Amino acid sequence: MGDTLQILVAMVIYMAVVIILGVTFARKANESSDAYFLGGRSLGPWVTAMSAEASDMSGWLLMGLPGVAYWCGIADAAWTAIGLAAGTYINWLIVSKRLRRYSEKAGNAITLPEYFSNRFHEKRKVIMTISAVFILVFFTVYAASCLVTCGKLFSTLFDLPYVPMMIVGAVFVLVYTIIGGFLAESASDFMQAVVMIIALGVIVCVGTASAGGLGAVIDNVKEIPGFLDFFGIATPQTVDGVQQAADGVPLFGEAAVYGFLPVASALAWGLGYFGMPQVLLRFMAIRREDELTRSRRIAVVWVVISLMIAVFIGLVGRTLFPTALTTSSEAENVFILLSTNLLPPLIAGFVMAGILAATISSSDSYLLIAASAFAKNIYQGLFRRKASDREVLNISRITLLLIAVVAIIIALDENSVIFTIVSFAWAGFGATFGPLMLFSLFWKRTTRAGAVAGMIGGGVMVFVWNLLVRPLGGLWDIYELLPAFLFSCLCIVAVSLLTPEPSEEICREFAEVQEGR
């Protein structure tokens, strides 16, 4: 059997297992919209933790992060990983239990827009509509990043055109999500989290051994100016974006300074967790609040190990294949390059199923949450309040199809950098929902008007900073999540203090949640 065929067989076996999971949970998922969108609040601690992190990390963990480390060294990748690890821990520590309790108290909310709307006792569903629209926009971009991952994976593996391969990946994810809903998504995400960390572990061990050991890897990349510096960054010498080489050695210029602003930008990634719907929904879906402590420990251990390995894989790739990937976009294929060159084809196929696992675990979450935002919160919440559960489910599936089509259009450019696409969508969610989530849970004085101002202010500032301010460079060149998050906080506090206090009923409900009732 040829190498490529063996890789294909391994990946087909993996995809078949995922589809079987979807079919297995299809009957339960179709019982009601509550079961389809939140699994009836029935997740156990292991599934909650592992599915949350798998859906969060996506193909970015196996392609984007190692690609950044391969291209310019550890500074950008490592500080981002530190921010993500810290954000993961704090989010599970302070948000998870209170959100689980409050979402049930607030009308048994099963989506994030519904929680925000019920939290402020809306009659006119303004918060619900705004949050649903932002979810649709940013999750469509997020889904596009997953499709780029699929396209790059299949195109690189099978030497076939990028666009058809990206569309094949999109169709598979779409069919799977339509069949199974939240329970299938969570169960498969648990399996995919296991596959992802095994794949990372196999590649880092085999790659390090092939490079001559840990010391050999460190000694090699130490020769590149700034590559191992936490406050410096390597600068590949490029012509039209392509890194140059001489006598088989990649060319780098002098190391650039990685100062306070870049560090703050990288650490700011951790703020995104407070507004990440695919993670927050897991908090709402766990069967019992007291199980979240165990989930937190599982999630944090998984995240820290996975992030550390992902960064180191970039260093191993630069040691073994220093001139193989010559653009920042190509650098994101370093995991694939190591797998296909260092492992037997059949094993490589299963390892690279880790990339597919990461992609599926995220894209199904993104598509499902975006569809629920429209079907449950806009269609039923605004236009057809008496719509039946069956009607809501059908509308959600139509929405899934439309979102997938838009995501495919966004993903048509095969030179897209996954890290860049993900960073924008991550900032969007972090700034739109993160501050409001924290204030809604911990500040009784937050008003409905403040909530609206915070969402709009944060969401709009992401676009303004990314498109207009950040290109100015210098002091303005900071990741848009940080200024947008702070601006959203300012909007919530200022507008809440300028508007009448919340009603007694809202304050009483807040106090009951605070007291654990």
Image (cartoon, helix red, strand yellow):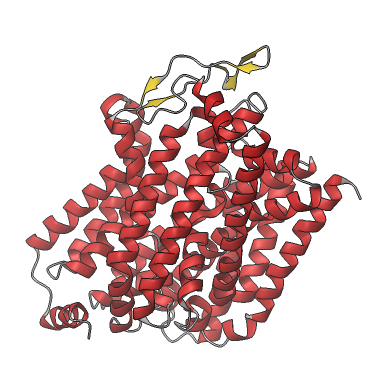
Count every numbered label the image shows and give the total.
Answer: 0
Please tell me which residue is depicted at 29% across the width and 32% down the height of the picture: 261
Which of 485 and 357 lies nearest the eye of the viewer? 357
Say if 121 sits above or below 246 in the image. below
Determine whether, in the image, residue 371 is placed left or right of residue 477.
Answer: right
Q: Is residue 186 above or below residue 302?
A: below
Task: Name the quadrant containing residue 356.
Answer: bottom right
Task: Provide residue 270's location: percent of width, then percent of height.
Answer: 35, 50
Judged from this view, the residue extending furthest toward the right is 1
Q: Is residue 353 left or right of residue 504?
A: right
Residue 37: x %, y % from top left? 49, 76
Q: Position of residue 480 (x, y in %)?
A: 33, 41
**Image coordinates for residue 460, horizontal then vertical, percent:** 31, 48
In this rendering, the answer to whether 218 lies above or below 293 is above
Left or right: 212 with respect to 66?
A: right
With respect to residue 342, does 222 lie above or below?
above
Direction from residue 492 to residue 227 in the image, left or right: right
* Residue projecting furthest to the top: 246
* Nearest to the observer: residue 60 or residue 298: 298
Q: Is residue 433 visible?
A: no
Residue in the picture at 61% in, 67% down? 191
- Residue at x-position 50% and y-position 66%: 50
Task: Please identify the quadrant where the C terminus is shown.
Answer: bottom left
Q: Quadrant of residue 100?
A: bottom left
Residue 475 visible in this rendered orientation of the protein: yes
Q: Nearer the viewer, residue 188 or 120?
A: 188
Q: Image point 54% across, 82% down: which residue?
A: 391
